[in-house]
Image (tube, rainbow, N blue to C red):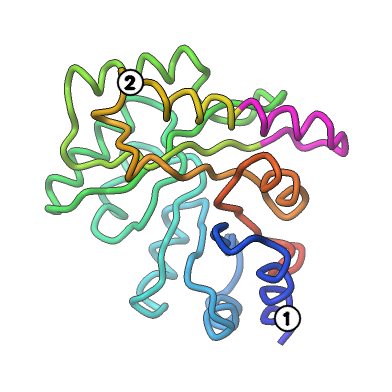
Amino acid sequence: MIIAANIRKIKQQIPKHVQLVAVSKTKPVELLMEAYHAGQRAFGENRVQELLTKQPLMPDDVEWHLIGHLQTNKVKYIAPFIHLIQSVDSLKLLETINKEGEKNKRVINVLLQVFIAKEETKFGLNEDELHELLAFCLNKPMQHICICGLMGIATNTEDKLEIIKEFNYLKSIFDNLKSNKKYEHILSSSHFNLLSMGMSSDYDEAINSGSNIVRVGSAIFGNR
């Protein structure tokens, strides 16, 4: 009941166009089902092994998002069913996803993860790497991936101004890519429209900065 109440509260707080992804890492399927019965359909997992354990036990209409660092050798396990890989942080990973998409005869939706935090432990492409990756895609199109937008994780800090600065930085990169005619063939305006920023502690700031996907765990399920 508490999980259902938490989901209702968050959905009342966030605009209708913002998707809520329930971060269910380390949580048992029983709690995920509580969220499901409260109307939640999008769930985010950090680790492939945990995702593979939960996926067969959940209803078929669940949208699974991979939000943690993904190793290339794990892509094949989630390629048949994953809804969105939010954490693409290298060209090598993108090429592997494309290859596995071809094997599974499907187009796999991805977000490119951009490094915006002041923490070296975080993953992501810097701006130069992002443009290098997109330039490669222009010259060698990948038919089995769809680049749907960007994702970023802000610094873990109490300094709200720093967090807002990082979110605004990612939004500016997103807007520049969206309006850049050079990339219009691979960043189609009908597909490149997702900006995933914000977690339990900072989703308000993220939404104010332009996020339309928030990844919320503890505010739904409680602290780990």
Q: Quadrant of the C terminus?
A: bottom right
16 sits to left or right of 57: right
Q: Residue at x 45, y 51 (%)?
A: 66
Image quadrant in which the N terminus is located? bottom right
Q: Which residue is mark 2?
A: 181
Q: Position of residue 48 (x, y in %)?
A: 42, 53
| Quarter of the rendering containing residue 55 | bottom left
- Inter-mark Cα distance, 1 to 2: 45 Å
Residue sticking out furthest to the right: 158
**Quarter of the rendering containing residue 138:** top left
Q: Position of residue 152 (x, y in %)?
A: 58, 36
In the rendered view, tell whether residue 149 sits above or below residue 82: above
Q: State the residue at coordinates (67%, 48%).
A: 207
Question: What x and y, as percent, mark residue 115?
Answer: 58, 26
- In the rendered structure, which amino acid carries the disc numbered 2? Lys
Residue 110, given in percent of the width and then of the height, sits at 37, 43
